[in-house]
Amino acid sequence: MPMRRLCLLLLSLAAPLFSAPAIAAEPLVVAAVDSPGKVLRVELSLDEGRIAWRASRLGEPIVAPSRLGFLLRDAEKLERNFVLVEQHTSARDETWQQPWGENRLVRDHHVELRARFAESMRAKRTLDLVFRVFDDGIGFRYEFPQESATDVVIDDELTEFNLVAPAATAWWIPAGEWNRYEYLYQRTPIEQVGQVHTPVTFRLASGLHVAIHEAALVDYAGMWLRRVEGTRFKAVLSPASEGWKVRRRAPFTTPWRTLRVADTAAALYESNLELNLNAPNQLGDTSWFKPAKYVGVWWELHLENSTWATGPKHGATTANTRRYIDFAAENGFRGVLVEGWNRGWDGQWFGDGNDFDFTRATDDFDLEGLAAYAKQRGVHLVGHHETGGAVSHYERQLGDALDLYRRLGIDVLKSGYVADAGQIERNDGDGLVHREWHDGQWMVRHHERVVREAAARHIAVNPHEPVKDTGLRRTWPNWVSREGARGMEYAAWGNPPNPPEHEVNLVFTRMLAGPMDFTPGILSLMGRKQPLKSTLARQLALYVVLYSPIQMVADLPANYARQPEAFRFIRDVAVDWETTRVLAGEVGDYVVFARRERGGDTWFLGGITDENGRVLDVPLAFLEPKRRYVAEIYRDGDDAHWRDNPFDFVRETREVGSADTLRVRLAAGGGQAIRFVPKR
Amino acid sequence: MPMRRLCLLLLSLAAPLFSAPAIAAEPLVVAAVDSPGKVLRVELSLDEGRIAWRASRLGEPIVAPSRLGFLLRDAEKLERNFVLVEQHTSARDETWQQPWGENRLVRDHHVELRARFAESMRAKRTLDLVFRVFDDGIGFRYEFPQESATDVVIDDELTEFNLVAPAATAWWIPAGEWNRYEYLYQRTPIEQVGQVHTPVTFRLASGLHVAIHEAALVDYAGMWLRRVEGTRFKAVLSPASEGWKVRRRAPFTTPWRTLRVADTAAALYESNLELNLNAPNQLGDTSWFKPAKYVGVWWELHLENSTWATGPKHGATTANTRRYIDFAAENGFRGVLVEGWNRGWDGQWFGDGNDFDFTRATDDFDLEGLAAYAKQRGVHLVGHHETGGAVSHYERQLGDALDLYRRLGIDVLKSGYVADAGQIERNDGDGLVHREWHDGQWMVRHHERVVREAAARHIAVNPHEPVKDTGLRRTWPNWVSREGARGMEYAAWGNPPNPPEHEVNLVFTRMLAGPMDFTPGILSLMGRKQPLKSTLARQLALYVVLYSPIQMVADLPANYARQPEAFRFIRDVAVDWETTRVLAGEVGDYVVFARRERGGDTWFLGGITDENGRVLDVPLAFLEPKRRYVAEIYRDGDDAHWRDNPFDFVRETREVGSADTLRVRLAAGGGQAIRFVPKR
């Protein structure tokens, strides 16, 4: 193999890349890259022509040699007989700005390794591997090069994550099952993990935290992870109805496979790995999107006080909607969502939404009049498109439906894909109904289409039962939120309901992906026939803890009227942030956030715990050093407990400064919310 | 039982004490007390006359009903047929000052419950139980009342700690074995704990941290803990040669049995529970004790470069000691320890120290001349009394030996009790040799005697192979440090040597008890025939991490001369602190401290990790808000690793302020030390 020998000769001149000691029986390391602070190191090796990657942190292995490659349809698998033909490293350190988000400024500081491999025999195909190594994580993707210019049909990825993580604890939800992402997170030994969605989070016996996910999922199938044996995981792509997983024409790139690595749960959350791996804003100025709170006809539906369907209990009536508009206007909330406003809800629609009409309201809902009334009161209707999973049907009306909203000043759209996993209805007009997955390539394309069509009309989107978040809000900043986990409605009727640990689990799993429209703020603490497993103060804290630039004020107006003191925090809390810090936290146990409002000096603190009470001494060092603040504290009363005393609640104020330490006391299933207002 | 009924009637008027719901088949709660912030709650119950205590935290149980009482010699056990005859609660919130310590000011904020129980039949003996409940822990003790005025001979305590801690992790060393406290700490499931010394530390599955220990061990036997079954532990008193464990004349009180409870490892460390439970300073002004660093003839003995015994390699010669005096004087270290200075080292002395003479020096050691030379150079000799376990022999010379030191200006004494556990030699002059334990009642009395005799002569004491620390430094502030764990000498010759996790384990176990004379600073990173499992920067960090008001600068002067840059930190670091904070840490994994020097504005940071490297973002919020500081950073180099690159080391300076966050990067087995000097 003269070609291979040449490559090795060339590469051996690049001495720094070969500093890893060659250990007998180890595969040959052909390329390596260190993170900017020399914290993480990735090495690529060839073992009889098979490419593998591995990673270490501060000199200790964290990923053992792990396979790379593809199973292809109608072509030999892309995995063997490779030689390295070219490699290049480059460094980047830049800070970019988010139009909205947890932080205004995001630093992207990484070293990139590009390595081109070519088959040494037969087809002589080439494959590029790109690794970006940050101090707090690793991203890598495959690039199918320009010159191939062929259709590539991927049956599956061979990508592995062979973790060095014996006796680790894992937090996960199953993938490839009937449900989408709406499971309770399980906390088990890593060896009990099966096939899971990402982000999946691990805490190693060493105390290290690792989360695997992906970034920039565009025109590709979502990645699941399957534990193969021990602590070795492999990528499994979400299915397509055709049998293969992905069909693309080269050149193209896969999404980034990502691995956050941090010593603390706080640092795991604070990483911006996936955002940094997404392409910059493609939409230009999106200042037409206004982060805001919204109310609406929603919780009453889940309580069965009213119905989506028309009839005597129809929720989306003109009169009822006017009441929500008034409530929003009186309290400074921007949006009013109305579910059930359009035609098509009267039959079975779960998994079968072909009756939905996205441009015509029910007879008892005066869409034009309400939009005008909202405008007059200074608020905006929030659009709603439930598809019931009939996505082809929805796509045919999409343009008209968005045009209607554009005309009426409706600039945020909540959509829904209520259908079981693998039950999305695709109808190509060929007389066949295809059944797709919520995170398969076809639905990934659908979401992109909706986001682009909406952006063209200056509408922001918030899909429920969505594909998971992979940081695309950076590229398309009108993709402002989504569901993709068990939200508040499971507190209303879930069996089992959300336990106190649920939202803490979310922070260190689901929320690593991005904003969630969880819809907090149920101050009645009462679901359909079951109480919430939450104290009152906790409902307030959720506004700070669970990030979304649109936050629902989800309870009934009448219930807020009964809790005027607590409701004050919901009115006051910001939704867009200059900066965010996790002050304390352990995965699944508790977390305390501090966030400063975007464009202001007011800070907010939110802390929640699981079924165990906590007492945490939190230095207020995030406050501006030379100022004094009035801390408006909304906390659990001394005898509060989610089980038998959830309404025990105290609002009190204290003057504080950055040198103070606050004792944050969280009841079992409790929380605490604080607004720090600078003194003038 | 009319008396009992009367009591219950009286008690039932005290309604708040009876708010716990009475659950069927649960024992009757007769008294209860909440901590000041209603974080911890203790309840006492009677079940057919047997007293039990239990505890909850924020409404969740942490200690299930646990037995109380005594097995007595020549009397019926003190456990059954009790009725509650009196109870009283009182609150205290006071802040007291330590003459030296981790913090100048200590807040004692607790609620005390005193409950008097009396036997309802036969002897009708009484027993008082006193609980002091803090937000961060619980202390309780037995009081044998005034009126009994009899000899009490205790065969064992029945005290239990019935933890609600399934699947907890425990850090522990065995008790009742051949060794004293000089084990490597084990990290195991709680269910694998056997009989252990205190402090013993648990991290519960809930994330809660618990440490059991005792406070104010005076004229009583040390408490071990034995796991009985599941997560139920019982007190086991250290043996006495007579067979019983404790002999006292009533009235007397037992030591406090203590339970620290905290959500974080940091808060577990920061608790002052045991100090608060000790009696205030009984010595008055102890400003004659000066916290200081010291050098001396010690590490060279452990390296076998020289010997304790006289002969050609004798370490404690006049000439050698003068060199150490010069080294100390040149570098501003106050003390010079000389081991092997006196007569009696030439034979076997391990466990047999009857040849030691504590007032006569060897022929090649000019004690008087060296004391004078030291004085002339502005330094002080540190005294040394090795007993080899022959304690009665030592006690006979104690007064004269301390008088000699007093006369020569030797004001710190290091003592030694090198003998296996249960091998201390006691000779009452009755022709019998009794064998006592290092932590039995007899040795507890011995240490008290030495401390008092030394205090009368203004001498501070630092015993090695001691009884454990139970916070008596508050009462007798001349008890300044001690050993009581595997120290640095195990790095020289231990088999196995101290692993990188050792000092991190110490912080959250042994160091909860109080100061340790660990003797850090081996910048050669080399033991007798084995390298240290440490980077260079870590040796510096240990001065901040492992608290003692006397800190040895333990390496050979020649080795410091080879590391002038690193040595600078050892010269500069303070030994007495205004305040101490744990900025980050997990038991057995890593820890980062910040401490401000007593009476000054300089801050120090010290961080160490186990065999895993760490990257921790540490807000510098502890710095004074309006000042700028020059941070003198002593850190692991980018490629440092304890195994193969321990000398990779960087000293650099940066200007910082309280609003900055510092990325603290610790190599595997590494550390970081920083001195923050305020800018003028």
Image (spheres, coloured by chain):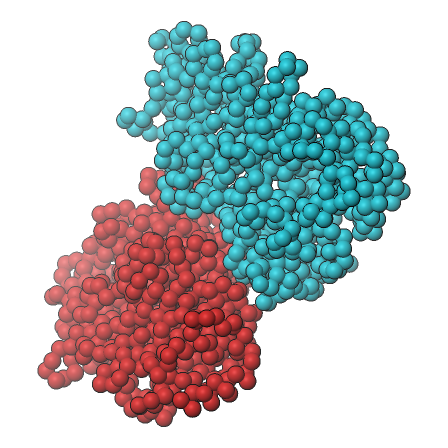
Chain colours: A red, B cyan
Q: Is residue B369 left or right of residue A100?
A: right
Please name whichever residue, B595 or B4, is drawn nearer the observer in this view of the structure: B595
- What residue is at 38 percent from the left and 71 percent from the top? A66
Question: Residue A16, located in which quarter of the rendered image?
Answer: bottom right
**Looking at the picture, how far across and down is residue A328, in whole percent?**
35, 61
**Looking at the picture, how far across and down is residue A423, in whole percent?**
18, 70
Q: Is residue A379 left or right of residue A61?
A: left
- What residue is at 73 percent from the left and 35 percent from the top? B346
Check the image and name the residue furthest to the left.
A431
Quarter of the image containing the N terminus of chain A? bottom left
Please name whichever residue, A312 or B438, is drawn nearer the observer in this view of the structure: B438
- When the figure is inspected, residue B17 is found, relative to residue A340, above or below; the finding is above
- What residue is at 33 percent from the left and 81 percent from the top? A80
Question: Residue A454, located in which quarter of the rendered image?
Answer: bottom left
- Residue A127 seen in this snapshot: no
- What residue is at 34 percent from the left and 49 percent from the top? A500
Please name whichever residue, B36 or A436, is drawn nearer the observer in this view of the structure: A436
- When the figure is inspected, residue B320 is found, relative to residue B109, above or below; the finding is below
Quarter of the image containing the C terminus of chain A? bottom right
